[in-house]
Amino acid sequence: MNYSPLFVCREVENSRSVLKDMDEDELDAFVDAQADKVQRNLTDQVDRLRKTIKSKKPKKPTKEECATEEEYAQKSKEYEEKKEAYSKFVQWSTLILNKVAEWVTEICNRIIGLFHQLWTWICGKIADIASKVQQAILVIKEQMDTFLQFIFQYI
């Protein structure tokens, strides 16, 4: 992703040309559409997490799949071991999912802080907002990179 001030300015100009003739209701609808994109993306990512966890669920054997009672007994034993492992996996995955929820909240809180700061800059007619936004985005990105390195340092 490009975070240069030139890129930020270009993106703002593109938005400005789209938004310039909109009334308040249209602006609200535009904000809603942008927020809906973020929400769909987050929902898609959560669905990926859910599917990844559930994909590890073992398949219970059936007698029809087995040629003999011994084979069924062996597959049932293997299934019980995998089911126990899956239960542990779900326990650990749940812990991680709860942390993901906390992290998403923290990220959103930081971004909301950036929105408040951006509003202050605009109302204060601060010059060079693009570089301030670019700098804020880079700080958030660096914090996220550091955070992710910390989380995954042992993997």
Image: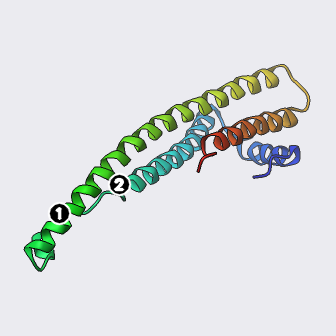
Q: Nearer the viewer, mark 1 or mark 2?
A: 1
Viewer can see residue 56 = yes
Query: Quadrant of residue 25 in the image?
Result: top right
Q: Amino acid at mark 2?
A: Lys
86 or 25: which is nearer to us? Answer: 86
35 or 58: which is nearer to us? Answer: 58
Residue 31 falls left or right of residue 9: left
* x and y percentages locating residue 91 in the rendered image: 36, 41
Q: Residues within 10 Å of mark 2 (few under 14, many from 20)?
A: few
Residue 54 got which mark?
A: 2
Residue farthest toward the right in the current orientation of the protein: 127
* x and y percentages locating residue 83 in the rendered image: 26, 54
Residue 94 falls left or right of residue 141: left
- Residue that carries the numbered disc 1 in the rendered image: 76
60 or 120: which is nearer to us? Answer: 60
The reply to whether the C-beta atoms of the residues labelled 1 and 2 are less than 8 Å apart is no
The total number of labels drawn is 2
